Amino acid sequence: MLPRHQDPIVAVATASGRGAVGIVRASGRDLRALIDALCGRPLEARRATYLPFADGAGGVIDQGLAIHFPAPHSYTGEEVLELQAHGGPVVLQLLLARCLEAGAAIGLRLAEPGEFTQRAFLNDKLDLAQAEAVSDLIEASTEAAARSAGRSLSGAFSSEINGLRDRLVGLRMLVEATLDFPEEEIDFLEKANARGRLNDIQDSVAAVLDRARHGALLREGIKVVIAGQPNVGKSSLLNALAGAELAIVTPIAGTTRDKVSETIQIEGVPVHVIDTAGLRDSDDEVERIGIARSWNEIEGADAVLFMHDLTRLGAPGYDAGEARIESRLPATLKSANRLLHVFNKADAAPAAGTGLVISARTGEGIEALRRQLLELAGWHAQPEGVFIARTRHVQALRRTGEHLQRAQAQAARADAALDLLAEELRLAHDALGEITGAFTPDDLLGEIFSRFCIGK
């Protein structure tokens, strides 16, 4: 009996719903019986053939294109059959059922989420970073994210990581050779220029980390919460940033009872903006629920825009309300400079305060606010070579940098312990390997591929 990851599998490979074309994809070691049953004849390798797809009673399910990809020249590295039919859900389900019926003898089963791409990884058609880029390309919410995912899929990110690993391997070989042959009395740190090579690798890791952080921003975006007292212009600001009337705006305090969300793009970075209920004491049960949700959103925000009303500064009770809100804001927001004070209604009152002055009604200061949001996120102008990245990639690169810093500290000592230096270099090497899948636990692989769509 074959291991589960070698079972032949089949799935609908196109999105659910109706469309002009739908695809059923099968992958496995030997699909000849499946090809004969569905197509009625052998297929020429990698050439689309127009023919009827037969059901089990000699009838025809549909007519379309069949393409046979012999192993290893396929997406998965296994033998692959793709059936392109009309994109109605009933037609595709009939084709899928027929495939399962015809492939029962070879153990054909439904594919799990991401299993086709997982097999491409297991069969060395893609490394792990490239496999993740497949999902990222499908899910890209901006043009910049799609282009960056395409670069990662083509191997740009992996090439950077593999280059760093090769340089670390060279340095590790020198260190470990010195450990193995101490009688040679090689002054390793001087003659092999270990410090210089280590510094160069550390600088390169820092540069790749910076680009990976930008790639993670392109993929995941930032969550920005607009907070403040009622009627300070939070909903107007959301509408101004989105360029559409998304939230209801009235002079009545407490109009917004629940969060209103919209994703906008700033220089290709997805910014998930959330307008929240005004923060105040209220006897209205519904409004209290909305205010509680506002505080929950603030707790999980990457950045908070604390809105102030220039026309009400100094008014009875207003400043005390501002102070109460600010005292409840998470300390981490302030310590990490992720709290931005925004003074609204500049068109109706003179500027005051130490934050950003805007008018959500006229648009004054909105572009400056957009730039500050990017600064809060840590974004700066990048060359075209940014590649898509995930949080786990950023974390692995940070760990790599930490191990290299410890290695550098050892190398700088007059009585350097080469065994400790070698161990830190090994740990840095392993951390880099996690990105491309060279050293990746099976449970992490399962978590990664389970988030893919079925059929990919």
Image (cartoon, rainbow, N blue to C red):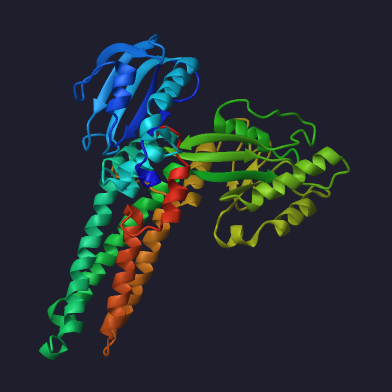
In this rendering, would 147 be left or right of 357?
Answer: left
In this rendering, would 311 be left or right of 62?
Answer: right
In this rendering, would 226 be left or right of 136?
Answer: right
In this rendering, would 28 be left or right of 104?
Answer: left
Q: Quadrant of residue 79?
A: top left
Is the residue 401 above or below the residue 216 in the image?
below
At 68% from the left and 38% from the top, the residue drawn is 259
Is the residue 409 above or below the residue 183 in the image?
above
Is the residue 442 above or below the residue 410 in the image?
above
Report x, y in % for residue 368. 50, 42
For the view shown, which residue lies furthest in the right direction?
283
Choose between 344 and 248: the one closer to the eye: 248
The answer to whether residue 388 shows anywhere in this view is no
The answer to whether residue 196 shows anywhere in this view is yes
Q: Quadrant of residue 440?
A: bottom left
Choose between 201 and 380: the one closer to the eye: 201
Q: How many marks?
A: 0
At 74% from the left and 56% from the top, the residue drawn is 323
At 67% from the left and 38% from the top, the residue drawn is 234
Report x, y in % for residue 247. 67, 30
The N terminus sits in image quarter: top left
Report x, y in % for residue 168. 23, 66
The C terminus sits in image quarter: top left
Is the residue 439 above or below the residue 239 in the image?
below
